[in-house]
């Protein structure tokens, strides 16, 4: 149980999602139940069995990133990160200054793939057109293949390097790579930084973009994606009996975290308290969680204990809810094991039903959604849930968003490889 007296407030939020390029467009779309899933537009997917995804639409990095020189070094997912992080910093109305830079931390959940498909395709076309790689031709060619900027853009730590440079962060920095749990674990790491006194502020979040031929092909080979190409807005249906796979999404979500009393003293708007986090590592299968929900059970129990909350204190759970057969059943089993009789009361929804699965960004975006839900007193619905799976018999928010006070919420993120993350958030009142 957390013994620290340093509580942590969420004072800034920034989003780039399939529903909108900022918080101001994403949140209303989410509450209205709109879908961000459509036919793939970023490349020709006509030859793929899956031709739908939840893409970020009409994104202009030059309009969203004020320091345009940074864009030279940023690929698509890093552009999302820069835009969402800048929105979060502006929203919090606090930023690193020379005298505070070492007291700022930055922790990110970063995408798994650093080299863009277009770059791989150009290399193949020039230096291996017949399938045999010609290393001498590459070395002799110069141009893009010898450009160090191209190499720097491809590094998996490029995102955190750009963020720390852009905002002048000189304290603790780390990049988390735990697949779908990355964003949640990054936010949880930032929470511990502030609690332990290693930082007074933290920029924490996640970003990813795998909607390209290699990413889509990889998940198709795993059989993980829904191929409901003719009804994209219905393709992601977590917990529905007819679900047949997740929908790949992309985007970024960032939070500004700071010590709660300091936030109060400066008159900051506090969306919610980041009250606890729990993690576990399941050793079952790389792509499946245990049917009992074992790893998820551990993560949720640890988050509740860390936040000094009981199951009866939780109003809402933003479920991992990918819309795959085994994941949804496993998560429901875990929630029932942790919450007992309270599983019949607590409201549950998966916002992946509207924005798809943002992979490394999912945990951070969904933590931001929980903070917004607490702040606005509104639980987003679980879209496309019409045919109940008897093994997923929880109290889902369905039909429309549910308006009402949310005292505390959990955000679940469970990743390939068995990494499990759960974040606990709590409403902050004048007396709490």
Image (cartoon, rainbow, N blue to C red):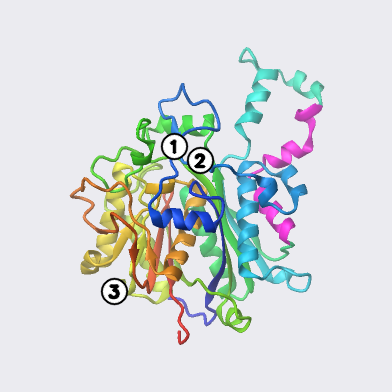
Q: Residue 386: where, in percent of width, then height?
A: 23, 47
Q: Is residue 295 visible?
A: yes
Quarter of the picture holding the C terminus: bottom left
In this view, the residue farthest toward the left is 390
Q: Residues within 10 Å of mark 3 (few under 14, many from 20)?
A: some
Mark 2, secondary structure of its residue = loop
Looking at the image, tell me whether mark 2 or mark 1 is earlier in sequence order: 1
**Please, is residue 82 above or below residue 97 in the view?**
above
Nearest the viewer among 421 and 398 is: 398
165 displayed left or right of 368: right
Q: Main secondary structure of the magenta part?
A: helix
The stretch in magenta equals 143-167
Give the quadrant of residue 171.
bottom right
What distance separates the C-alpha of mark 2 from that of mark 1? 8 Å
At 35% from the left and 62% from the top, the residue drawn is: 317
Determine whether 230 is above or below 363 in the image.
above
Tag shown at residue 55? 2
Residue 3 place in picture, x, y as percent: 48, 80
First in sequence: mark 3 vs mark 2: 2
316 relative position to 75: left or right = left
Give the image location of residue 78, x and y in percent.
64, 47
Q: Which mark is residue 312?
A: 3
Residue 178 seen anywhere in this rendered image of the structure: no
């Amino acid at each position: 149980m957390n013994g620290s007296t340093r509580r942590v407030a969420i004072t800034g939020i920034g989003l780039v999602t399939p529903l909108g390029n900022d918080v101001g467009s994403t949140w209303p779309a989410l509450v209205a139940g709109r879908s961000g899933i459509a036919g793939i537009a970023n490349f020709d997917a006509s030859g793929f069995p899956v031709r739908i995804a939840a893409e970020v639409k009409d994104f202009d990095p030059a309009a969203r990133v004020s320091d345009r020189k940074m864009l030279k070094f940023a690929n698509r997912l890093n552009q999302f990160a820069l835009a969402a992080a800048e929105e979060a910093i502006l929203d919090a109305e606090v930023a690193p200054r020379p005298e505070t830079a070492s007291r700022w931390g930055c922790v990110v959940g970063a995408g798994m793939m650093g080299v863009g498909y277009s770059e791989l395709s150009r290399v193949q076309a020039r230096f291996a057109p017949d399938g045999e790689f010609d290393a001498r031709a590459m070395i002799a060619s110069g141009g893009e293949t010898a450009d160090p900027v191209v190499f720097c853009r491809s590094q998996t730590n490029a995102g955190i390097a750009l963020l720390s440079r852009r905002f002048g962060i000189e304290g603790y920095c780390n990049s988390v790579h735990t697949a779908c749990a990355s964003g949640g674990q990054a936010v949880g790491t930032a929470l511990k930084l502030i609690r332990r006194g290693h930082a007074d502020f933290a920029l924490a979040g996640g970003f990813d973009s795998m909607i390209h031929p290699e990413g889509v092909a990889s998940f198709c080979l795993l059989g993980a994606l829904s191929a409901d190409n003719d009804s994209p807005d219905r393709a992601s249906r977590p917990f529905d009996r007819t679900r047949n796979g997740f929908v790949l999404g992309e985007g970024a979500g960032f939070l500004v975290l700071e010590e709660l009393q300091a936030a109060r003293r400066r008159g900051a708007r506090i969306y919610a308290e980041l009250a606890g986090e729990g993690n576990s590592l399941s050793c079952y299968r790389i792509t499946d969680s245990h049917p009992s929900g074992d790893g998820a059970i551990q993560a949720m129990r640890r988050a509740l204990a860390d936040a000094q909350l009981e199951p009866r204190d939780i109003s809402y759970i933003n479920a991992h809810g990918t819309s795959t057969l085994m994941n949804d059943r496993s998560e429901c089993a875990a929630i029932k094991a942790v919450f007992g009789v309270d599983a019949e009361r607590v409201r549950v929804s998966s916002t992946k039903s509207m924005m798809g699965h943002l992979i490394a960004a999912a945990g951070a975006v969904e933590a931001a959604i929980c903070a917004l839900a607490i702040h606005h007193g509104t639980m987003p619905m679980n879209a496309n849930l019409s045919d109940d799976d008897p093994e997923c018999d929880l109290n889902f928010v369905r039909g429309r968003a549910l308006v009402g006070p949310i005292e505390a919420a959990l955000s679940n993120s469970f990743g390939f490889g068995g990494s499990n993350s759960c974040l606990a958030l709590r409403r902050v009142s004048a007396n709490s």
